[in-house]
Image: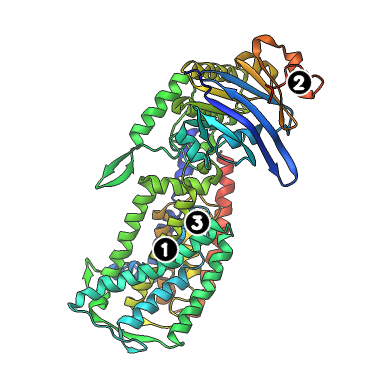
Amino acid sequence: MTEPLLVLDNIAKNYGAIEALKGVSFSIDRGEVVALLGDNGAGKSTLVNIIAGGLEPTSGRMLFEGKEFLAKTPAEAKAAGIETVYQDLSLCTNVDVVANFFMGREITRKVLGVPVLDERAMEQVVERALASAGTRIPSLRTNVEHLSGGQRQAIELNRFVHWGGKLVLLDEPFAALGVEQTRRGLDMIRQVASQGIGVIVITHIMQQAFQVADRIVVIRQGVVAGDIARSKTSPDAVVKMITGETLVGAGPAG
Amino acid sequence: MNPRTRHALEFILDNLVWFMLIFVLLVFSAVIPNYLQLGIFANIIEASSVLGVMSIGLALVIIAGHMDLSVESVAALSAMAVGILFCSSGIGIGVQLHPEWLMVPASLLLALAVGGIIGALNGFLVVKVRMSAFIITLASYIWVRGLVLVISGGRSAQDLAPAIRWFAIQRLAGLPLTAWIAIACFVVFSLIMAKTPFGRHLVMIGGNETATFRAGIRVNRNLVIAFVLAGAIAGLAGWLLAIRTSGATANLGVGLLFNAFAAVVIGGVSLKGGVGTLPGVYAGVLLLSAINTAINLMGLPANFTQVIHGLLVLAAVLLDAFKQTIRQRLA
């Protein structure tokens, strides 16, 4: 298994005349954590959306586990084993914690041939998942609208840890978290990666990137401005790549 | 606020309509002579069967975050189709099937199919063309009613086949079978909404459509099914309407939409989507019916009904807004 988990080959995306992505190429291995950095509007979220099946690229191709891959819907990406945690939280605040945790993947049992939600089984799974991650939520049956921003984000993070898959995309996952919760979130990422899952994490915070990532990829104005192992660079150098002061460590040729 | 008060308050908010129903029934029973009778209560349930069934379909799409204004016209078209085929006088052509009971499933299937097809068209336009459900179903509301006028020529069909009429006459525990059909619909659809993944998904789509799409739920498919169900249920309401009036007139059921709307909103379904349960809607329907019965018993001119219904719709929407403010306080 030497082939990379996911290869992006010259992915471009135009919105009319605006080129959000001009041709992004990088790859990620199994069990690797890649921090995706870049200034506001650099195209990071667009890229995540393309991998996750929410957007179609204008051109370019992707290889997932060595095979040509393009998810037309998030459902397809999910079926292929790609989990995504979005910047704007993807929770339905009008239903409870359990319902959100199992959104679209409910455990059912058949009653007279009709699938019926197995609430107890789902509640037990959620209880265990949250407990093992050290997340405390007063009642799993409260609607998410009554929970704090941090608790909501914790639900999302626990959700991806639980479902796993093969590749996890995290778009600014710690925006609403406190110091302690962030530390635990970073631990979660390492723990997920140690299971052989690839993780792409978008962040603004240099310190987080250096804490968790094996490799740092910088996107600037829609192209890869830097792709370098964490151990071979420094926060200062990365900042310069983000702002465009240097082209040292520019992306792989071609 | 301690958790217990909060819990109690939420319970009251969630079931507000049932408390209102009980309150209204108590007041009417105390104030209006002859109101407190089993026969009156049976009548309230009986009179609410058509409206009740129609409200179920409307509630489904509103809970899913959309709107279906066409249910009233769809019911009228289904009723007219049944009337024309199975009535023996007026514009009815009096189709006879043997054995006679075959007319029951035949007329029922016809009504459901008519409704389902229009529902499918609504759903397709909403999902594929991405137009506002409000506008699309408003158009359906108008053209379907127009179609009723066209195929009936403005005339009516009378004398529905006795085999079908039987449902309005045969009683079980004091209620006609048509009322039991409505109750059965509420039970079945309440279970679907509360206990099945499909129902859960509709509620979540109404809450946050983007999130459900990202989670891999087939949003479009679920929405189209909801619209088809709303249409088919409206067709069933039309079938019940034809049975109740033993035929169909061109203006059959005019005004039902707004009553259904009132019932759904009074029943605790939020127009923003994602909030509401079908038992609540049934309580809303019964509440309207209880008020109508009171108006009749007090001998008020029937024209008053419309004024009161209009005010009720207004009150319901205000109540919806008020409940949301309270909930925000609670959160």
- Residue B65: assigned label: none
Residue B259 at what x, y percent from top left? 48, 68
> Considering the numbered disc 1 on the image, is that residue within a helix, a strand or a loop?
helix
Q: Amino acid at mark 3?
A: Ile
Residue A182 at what x, y percent from top left? 59, 20
User: From what the image shows, is residue B272 above or below residue A32?
Assistant: below
Q: Nearer the viewer, residue A87 or A150?
A: A87
| Neighbourhood count class around disc 1 (C-alpha, 10 Å): few under 14, some 14–19, many 20 upward | many
Residue at 46% in and 71% down? B72
Residue B181 at what x, y percent from top left? 30, 65
Q: Amino acid at mark 1?
A: Val
Q: Who comes first in sequence, dot 3 or dot 1?
A: 3
Which residue has dot 2 on it?
A: A241
Q: Nearer the viewer, residue A229 or A91?
A: A229
Q: Nearer the viewer, residue B198 or B323?
A: B198
**Left or right: B295 with respect to B93?**
right
User: From what the image shows, is residue B159 above or below residue A122?
Assistant: below
Which residue has dot 3 on it?
A: B62
**Left or right: A18 with respect to A80?**
right
